[in-house]
Image (spheres, grey):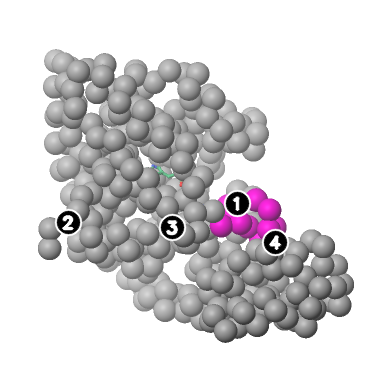
């Protein structure tokens, strides 16, 4: 079947994937394979912008490959590779940096947030993070980028960067990509307040054991107004309830909705049910992941093959880019 176009997305190997990555992005990575030619990249260079101690970088990159493959990435059709294995991206990053006003980078909300989180490590690479991301997307002449809503400013930035490049060099070799989100573009963390993220330690790893999952779920913050068991709760403001809607059978969701409001079910019971449903939903993924983990050579071969295929596309684009810029 003819494919509709090309999909590209990247994910940082800062640890194993969490429920936010899964519901916000990975589910779309998998679904889009049916209709698009897909390229997925484990962005180790992006991880370097915030990770100073790289002792776990290789292991985390491998773990992320396991997560993606077990989630349903099909390496026979889809290209799965590690960013630093395709050095053309750093060349395009340098070229794109020349059409990028510095003020635009420092004004980005994503940059300001990173500075707030880690004021002692505001490095040049961190400022240029969105330029490297633009290079990722442009290098593969991407049509669609599946991401969570937190990446919206970066996606808009990438489109503008492509426009600036094409305008400056009077060309149309680079393409503007569209963003695609899932039905849950922003998953909250177990604190029930902030976006789920590893750096805030409010995450639930999808590859966790059932026991670890239960433990994390029991830490989840529910309706803050519901203090005692006998207080009626409001599911509309409860993150556990929003996740029930995804993982729990419909009749049970309705029952919880009614019973929570009249204090018929307590938060402890509600969370235990959620953990059980989440564990059940993730069981096939965890089984596949364990199988893959027993074949590390196969996983490494998939990444090597992905890099080889990605390099071929990247080099084609770079030939056109160098010609447009008139690099001698
Ligand atoms: P990263 O590694 O932070 O996250 C990977 C993907 O997961 C999504 N995501 C979420 N979605 C919903 N709720 C959440 N709590 C949540 N947390 C994470 C992210 O939106 C993302 O889609 N800059 C990117 C990596 C990147 C990239 C690219 C993405 C590098 N180059 C090119 C797309 C295209 C990032 O840090 O994602």
Callout in the foreground (1, 4): 4
> What secondary structure is marked by label 1?
loop
Dot 2 surroundings within 10 Å: few (below 14), some, or many (20 or more)?
few
**Stretch in magenta:** 187-197
Q: Is residue 196 magenta?
A: yes
Instruction: Pinpoint residue 131: horizontal percent, then vertical percent.
Output: 39, 30
Q: Which residue does the numbered mark 1 point to in the structure image?
A: 195
Residues at discs 2 and 4 in contact (Cβ within 8 Å): no
Choose the circle earlier in sequence order: 2 or 4: 2
Q: Is mark 3 within 8 Å of ligand 1?
A: yes
Q: Is mark 1 within 8 Å of ligand 1?
A: yes
Magenta stretch prevailing secondary structure? loop
Q: Which residue does the numbered mark 3 point to in the structure image?
A: 182
Residue drawn at (50%, 59%) of the image: 184
> What secondary structure is marked by label 2?
loop
Q: Where is the N terminus found, in terms of image quarters?
A: bottom left
Q: Which residue does the numbered mark 2 point to in the structure image?
A: 3
Dot 4 surroundings within 10 Å: few (below 14), some, or many (20 or more)?
some
């Amino acid at each position: 079947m003819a494919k509709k176009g090309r999909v590209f997305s990247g994910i940082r190997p800062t640890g194993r994937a969490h429920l936010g990555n899964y519901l916000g992005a990975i589910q779309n990575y998998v679904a889009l394979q049916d209709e698009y030619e897909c390229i997925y990249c484990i962005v180790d260079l992006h991880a370097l912008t915030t990770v100073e101690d790289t002792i776990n970088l290789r292991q985390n990159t491998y773990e992320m490959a396991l997560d993606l493959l077990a989630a349903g990435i099909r390496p026979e059709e889809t290209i799965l590779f590690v960013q630093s294995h395709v050095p053309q991206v750093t060349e395009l990053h340098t070229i794109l940096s020349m059409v990028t006003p510095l003020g635009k980078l420092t004004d980005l909300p994503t940059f300001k947030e990173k500075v707030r989180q880690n004021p002692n490590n505001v490095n040049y690479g961190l400022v240029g993070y969105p330029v490297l991301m633009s290079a990722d997307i442009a290098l593969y002449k991407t049509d669609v980028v599946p991401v969570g809503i937190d990446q919206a400013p970066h996606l808009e930035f990438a489109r503008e960067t492509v426009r600036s490049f094409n305008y400056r060099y009077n060309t149309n070799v680079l393409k503007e990509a569209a963003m695609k989100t899932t039905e849950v573009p922003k998953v909250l963390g177990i604190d029930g307040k902030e976006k789920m993220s590893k750096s805030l330690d409010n995450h639930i790893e999808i590859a966790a054991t059932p026991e670890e999952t239960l433990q994390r779920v029991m830490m989840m913050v529910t309706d803050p107004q519901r203090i005692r068991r006998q207080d009626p709760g409001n599911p509309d403001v409860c993150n556990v309830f929003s996740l029930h809607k995804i993982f729990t059978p419909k009749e049970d969701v309705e029952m919880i909705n009614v019973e929570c409001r009249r204090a018929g079910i307590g938060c402890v019971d509600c969370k235990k049910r959620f953990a059980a449903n989440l564990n059940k939903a993730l069981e096939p993924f965890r089984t596949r992941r364990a199988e893959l983990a027993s074949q590390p050579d196969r996983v490494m071969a998939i990444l090597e093959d992905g890099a080889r295929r990605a390099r071929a596309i990247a080099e084609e684009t770079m030939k056109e880019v160098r010609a447009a810029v008139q690099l001698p």
